[in-house]
Image: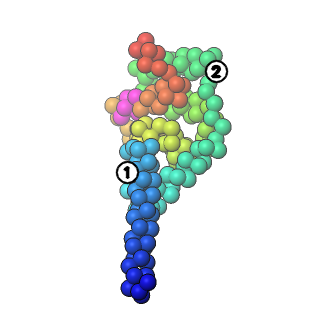
């Protein structure tokens, strides 16, 4: 075979390898974007580069696989639902106290399910794997609770925080649509 034939074969092999690598990267990015939804874009914005963000999201998935998450026993679930009803009723007379209760109640349910709860950022990262559509609202609710502790949140802010907590609470308790309709 002539020398130029080997060069053509080498170039074709390099192009084929580049196409395969690009295809794998695009597929992995698409899977992560699908799995994490809006959390994917938030993480890319925060990380500064897509590759760093995707490494972070893959790390979250690996960490999540190591968690021993359990569903709640029906009795525990019912108890938490009753506590939530009480918290929600309290909001009318004490929005600040009810918001703090909602935050603590979500934390209790997370702990009962098996999520580590020591650090808020880690909690949000862990939650993002299962509930990527809700983690942004959870962060917003937490930010409002922090502002409330500084006396900087309005009653409308607190109402919004409780609604955000409620959405995550429902998912953590694995309540169905029929349960939400009853309330």
Q: Residue at x 60, y 41 (%)?
A: 117
Query: Closest to the observer: 82 or 134?
Result: 134
The image position of residue 75, as x and y in percent, is 63, 16
Label number found at residue 73:
2
Instruction: Please name the residue shown 51% across and 55% down the image.
Output: 56
Per the rendered image, the range of residues in magenta is 157-163
**How many numbered tags mark residues here?**
2
Residue 49's place in the image compared with 68, above or below, is below
Q: Looking at the image, which residue sits at the far top? A: 182
Q: How is the image coloured?
A: rainbow
Q: Is residue 38 left or right of residue 104?
A: left
- Please provide percent x and percent y for residue 3: 42, 87
Specify the label residue 41 is tagged with.
Answer: 1
N-terminal label among 1 and 2:
1
Residue 96's label in the rendered image is none
Image quadrant for the N terminus? Answer: bottom left
As helix, strand or loop, the secondary structure at mark 1 comes to helix
What SS does tag 2 mark? Answer: loop
The outermost residue toward the front is 1
Please say whether residue 159 is one of the residues in the magenta stretch: yes
Residue 46 lies in quadrant? bottom left
In the displayed structure image, the side of residue 100 where residue 156 appears, left or right: left
| Residue found 41% across the figure and 86% down from its top | 2
- Please, which residue is most extreme toward the bottom here? 3
């Amino acid at each position: 075979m002539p020398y130029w034939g080997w060069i053509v074969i080498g170039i074709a092999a390099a192009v084929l390898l580049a196409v395969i690598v690009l295809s794998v990267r695009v597929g992995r990015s698409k899977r992560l974007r699908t799995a994490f939804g809006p959390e994917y874009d938030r993480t890319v914005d925060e990380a500064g580069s897509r590759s760093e963000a995707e490494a972070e999201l893959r790390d979250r998935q690996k960490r999540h696989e190591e968690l021993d998450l359990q569903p709640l026993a029906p009795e525990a679930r019912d108890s938490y639902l009753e506590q939530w009803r009480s918290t929600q009723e309290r909001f009318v007379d004490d929005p600040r106290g009810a918001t703090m209760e909602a935050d603590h109640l979500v934390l209790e349910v997370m702990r009962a399910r098996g999520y580590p709860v020591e650090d808020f950022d880690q909690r949000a990262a862990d939650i993002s794997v299962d509930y990527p559509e809700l983690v942004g609202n959870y962060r917003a609710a937490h930010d409002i609770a922090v502002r409330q502790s500084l006396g900087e949140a309005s009653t409308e802010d607190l109402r919004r925080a409780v609604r955000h907590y409620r959405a995550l609470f429902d998912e953590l308790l694995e309540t169905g649509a029929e349960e939400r309709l009853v309330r």
